[in-house]
Image: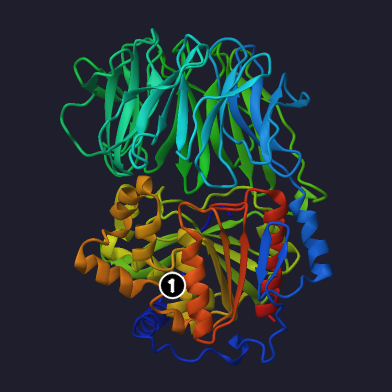
Amino acid sequence: MTRGNGTCGRARTAYAAALSLALCAAVAGRQSAPPDSAQPPATPAPLLPRHERGELLFDNIPAPDPALATRLARYLESRQASLLDWLPDGSVLIATRFGDTEQVHRVAAPLGAREQLTFYADPVSFARAAQSGGGFVFLKDREGDENAQLYYRAPDGSVRELTHGAFIHGDPVWAHDGKRVAFYGNDRDGASYDVYVADVTSGAAPQLLVGGRQDSWYPLDWSTDDAKLLVRRCVSLGESYLYVADAASGALTALDTSGRRIGIREAKFAPDGRGVYVLSDEDGEFAALRLVDPVTHQSRRVTPELNWDVEAFDASPDGRYLAYVVNQDGGSHLVVEETQTHGQVSPAGFPEGVITRVAFDRAGHRLGLSVESPEAPRDVYSYDLERGRLERWTRSEPGPLETGALVAPELVRFPTWDRVAGHPRLLTAYVYRPRQALHCPVVVYLRGGPESQFRPGWDPFIQFLVNELGMAVVAPNVRGSPGYGKSFLALANGELREDPVRDIGSLLVWIGDQPAFDRGRVAVMGAADGGYLALASLVTYGERLRGGIDFAGISNFVTFLTHTPAYRRDLRRAEYGDERDPHLRAFLERISPLTNASRIKRPLLVVAGQNDPRVPASESEQLVWRVRAAGGEVWYLTAKDEGHGFRRKINRDAYLGTAANFLVRIGR
């Protein structure tokens, strides 16, 4: 779901009064009855008993509508391409899908043929190339369990597994010698992230370099002489610490000796070896790029004062150019500057949208990136800085769709229930409107997370809802979303967890005030934290909704924190609250949708992957049982070969087909 520009401008007295009344009634559980048009159909369609289809299990879900399935299929045939890395010979590694899952491909030249290099049933969507030779490492888990193992593909095409076991691994970083790769893993105790180094030429087991305590450590970058490794110790999204590790002994030296708690997003050695680029929020509300002297610990700001996050950066190997990406209300703005003159290079011709990776090639002459928009799938581009020329490396197919007919979202701002500096707090939402919008039904799309942001990317399912079904899609960034400052990000932590639900109440009031929308036909849908928000909305504002879709949402915070893997638990406690504290435990139990399942009276579609390690499928199962026991209607879809999200096309298509069928039926 996605972006645009505009303001709401409807915070007048009558609106504020309606908002106040609606929120008070919702919190008290005494909302007035909606208009007659909001009532669900009197005779629900017959539902089918539990049955399996491949790796999918359909429980209480009606047979699909063939005509609807045919219309939807046109929107699900697109593919995308993502930049993974530059190879030393100037070609690129990309991830794209030609079968059921994404795999690694090589593209030798702009718009060249896509040569597939990995062939697995499970997706491979992350790879990093060695500094020399033609080898690369990649990560692959098994059926969505997220226990990713690290593999090395040699230049001759042979593949060797570098790690083993039911452990998680990630963030591989190559040394300049092209032989050693650093990565994190939780092999030691299953809970803590340690930093390991593997020599891909020796065949020896990876060696532990940094760790041995109950912390989360991540490798970031090697020094130019490969004698040192930059590592990050992460406590939470808002608290990290940087160290320089001796690559032989693992001895640590703090980069910042002040002990300040700051949120560090990314860091890497400057090409000249005399500084460290650090992307952090130490200057204020937003992430900015600084250059730190590892000897004096002094730093200077590199990027200008912005009321937006700098979210990614890279420096050319010769140090001549610095590129960074600014997140402006969900969209991406690319800046490239010469480090000596500080003059900006203005790459011309790049499509607007969301940039998902930025990386210089080995020579430092070309800047590569991936970019997508609501009207174009993600593709790989580069900009030749010496020639001032834009190059397109992939042309991903949108399927049989006419991209000119797709809808770009409008960015609006709506007032919520609290005030800032004496004025109503304004939140953003991206609104997709049907071209013939008149009293149309609405789908409220809720971002995941808990700390993620709705971004304006390629989403064919939204386009299907808007163009084929005539539904408006409204995607808010409620409090707790990144991109709007670290104070805003913290507004949903701990005992503030109900406040984003109140934001949804404010949005429902705003929707009811729009003449083009049918306030009697509104549904909610979301995944992960968005799934929880959808469930909580059905509990709190059920009389204003037709139904909801929950994909892998938390139904009970206490059982979630008990069963989510140990390597994730402390980070989640920092956001949701520590269930070991009796006061917080009682609070979390009280606000959990499972506790209030009897109040979910509208139809509900629940979707889960049975191998999900983040939000175990038991969170979905216990909710399904509880809502049904209270007389509620629940469609339940699970996949035996998926985890936190459906990554196989066959499963994803089945989910979206079920979701479309559900939304059509409840919207009648």
Q: Is residue 115 above or below residue 79?
A: above
Q: Is residue 554 above or below residue 509?
A: above
Query: Which residue is at a point 67% across and 55% down the rendered structure image?
Result: 652
Query: What x and y, as percent, mark residue 487?
Result: 29, 52
Query: Which residue is at a point 47% across and 51% down the rendered structure image?
Result: 613
Query: Which residue is at a point 43% across and 88% down the rendered structure image?
Result: 31
Q: Which image quadrant for residue 349?
A: top right
- Quadrant (top left/top right/bottom left/bottom right) for the N terminus: bottom right
Q: How many marks?
A: 1
Do we see residue 515 in this rendering? no
Q: Nearer the viewer, residue 449 or 363?
A: 449
| Amino acid at dot 1 | Ala
Which residue occupies the extreme left position in the image? 258
Query: Which residue is at a point 38% across and 71% down the rendered structure image?
Result: 592
- Quadrant (top left/top right/bottom left/bottom right) for the C terminus: bottom right
Q: Which image quadrant for residue 68?
A: bottom right
Q: Nearer the viewer, residue 478 or 596?
A: 596
The structure's colour scheme is rainbow
Do we see residue 65 in this rendering? yes
Q: Is residue 149 above or below residue 276?
A: below
Query: What x and y, as percent, mark residue 313?
Result: 45, 28
Q: Which image quadrant for residue 184?
A: top left
Q: Is residue 350 left or right of residue 329?
A: right
What residue is shown with label 1? 536
